[in-house]
Amino acid sequence: MPCLWSVGTYMERFYQDLGEKKFTGVKCPKCKTVYVPPRKYCSCSRAPLNQFVAVKSSGVIVNYTVAYQKVDGSRRESPVIIGLIRLDGADTAVFGEVRAAGTAIGIGTRVKAVFADQPGNTVESVSHFEPAKKK
Amino acid sequence: MRDVAIIGVGQNKHVAKRRDVNIPELISEAVDNCFAMSGTKPEQVDAVVFGNMHTFEGVNQPELWAGPMLGIVDRPVLRIATGGTTGATTAAAAYYHVASGMADTVLAVAFEKQSDGHAQMGLVAIALPEGLFMLGFSPSTGVEAMASGGSAGGAAYQAQSYMHASGATEEHFAMHVVKNRRNACKNPYAHLQFPNITVEDVLKTPMISYPIRYGFTCPSSDGACAMLYTTAEKAKKICDQPAFVLGTASCSTDPCLNPAGPTLSDPAEQIACKLAAKWAYERAGIKDPKKEIDLAEIYDPFAHQEMMWSERLSLFDEGKGPEMLQKGVTQMDGDLPINASGGVISTNAIGATAMIRVGEAALQIMGRAGEHQVPKKVNKTVSHGWGGLFQFVTVTVLSREPRKG
């Protein structure tokens, strides 16, 4: 039985902007926290959020894992690095695959998003992240 | 509010697959043991609270038909499902029934029969509807971010962060696994019982999601737990030494690993645990948990977690978990035994697991833990449960004596 979940108005805007290779968040008018992806209420100040802001597609790895297994428990041919990345201008972190191609990475490594060749209004607009130069 | 006591705890032997019994038959083993231990009968029960995670078996409402199959008919039934904390929330609901005066004697039952379904798919779907769709940035990588190798993917970030903050190493993780799986050998209901396991054995297991190895994860179990709650007055007539509930609390904070959107806090920081512990200790009249708590049962499905939670529950100073483990403080005969039962790293029938933490602490107070009864006198205990998106925690404080005033 297939389900069809609504993503909500804020996430719809987020995905539409991703299709244009842009990351969109919201900024709290009270505590100035920038949430990416956007949401309707601030966890810190409880304020309603409606000030949309653009953030950079570069950021820093704040946490990561190296996945050796797939969801079904089978081994991957080669392990995949999955990072929690705080984009420049955001206070929150997002998940993304990091392809480092031999470069050593860790907490604190700077990365930038690589967009898909033909981005659309979907999560797959971001292909992965790769190491980037210092800010 | 009335004083409430636990007078019975029943479990069954947890294993990977109980293909020989159906759901109510599995549960009834624990329920029968609970009645036998307390010397009570099903007809003395005024209400039933029933807990499990339906997505793990694919059976949506077992509470609607399983009650009569346990010998309990014509009684109110309340269903609880709060993920990993289900068992503790079910126990708390039984406590609320009695404390409020709505019922005198309440049976709390929690179980999971994970071999009937696919718990990993249930875990992935916890955050639906928005979660799965927004999990990370791509269905091909995003789902893996949280769920690579089951929930190990999410725990990997927490372990990574805890190592970073505390200096804990893979060797500490392995020492924790060895301690608890050896403890489990003395608990007849525990699933994984490895008397000769070594740190080297654990470190040799394959990596799932760095830094989580296969040996650093809990098993998937079939099993159940049942507990009987009643008023302090009735408890004193029924049993020599009940375990009294001093306080219970739960807290849900902003998700620390939020596939559905922004992630604000560090997954090892555990504000939910700190707040729930603070509230539970306040309700229990505990001023200094380091001095007043004699024993803990902690939710440790991953090998870094017992150390981490013991700090967040204020049993040790921040960052001291690895040192306390290494010194043997948390061993069965240590100053603060943690998971004398073998813990979650040895046994995990998810719905039952957080209730077993409460039940095992009660058994230690009652002096009924059998071979894994700790050698010291146990006056006050803390039990902990964890679930959700790394941000939902339950804390329960039990005591040899009822609440004062």
Image (cartoon, coloured by chain):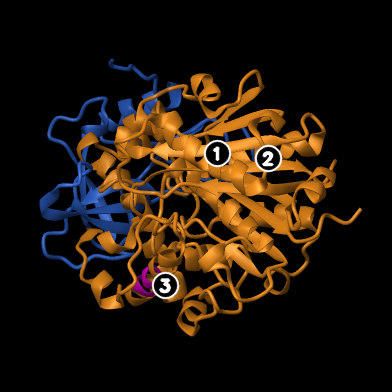
Chain colours: A blue, B orange
Per the image, label 1 sits on a secondary structure element best described as helix
Q: Position of residue B46 (x, y in %)?
A: 72, 28
User: x, y (%) of residue A61?
Assistant: 33, 58
- Measured Cα–Cα span from mark 3 to mark 2: 35 Å
Foreground of the two, B93 or B169:
B93
Give the image location of residue B302, x and y in percent: 39, 59
Q: Is residue B399 visible?
A: yes
Marker disc for residue B179 = 3
**Residue in the foreground of this view, choosing between B167 and B238:** B238
The magenta span reads: B174-178
Q: Are marks 3 and 2 on the same chain?
A: yes
Disc 3 versus disc 1: distance between alpha carbons? 29 Å
User: Which residue of the protein is positioned furthest toward the left in this rendering?
Assistant: A77
| Res B134 seen here | no
- The vertical placement of B294 against B89, above or below, is below
Q: Quadrant of residue A67?
A: bottom left
Magenta residues: mostly which secondary structure? helix
Q: Amino acid at mark 2?
A: Thr
Please name the residue shown 92% across and 53% down the image.
B405
Spatial CA distance of label 2 from label 1 is 11 Å
Disc 2 on helix, strand or loop? loop
Residue indicated by mark 2: B40
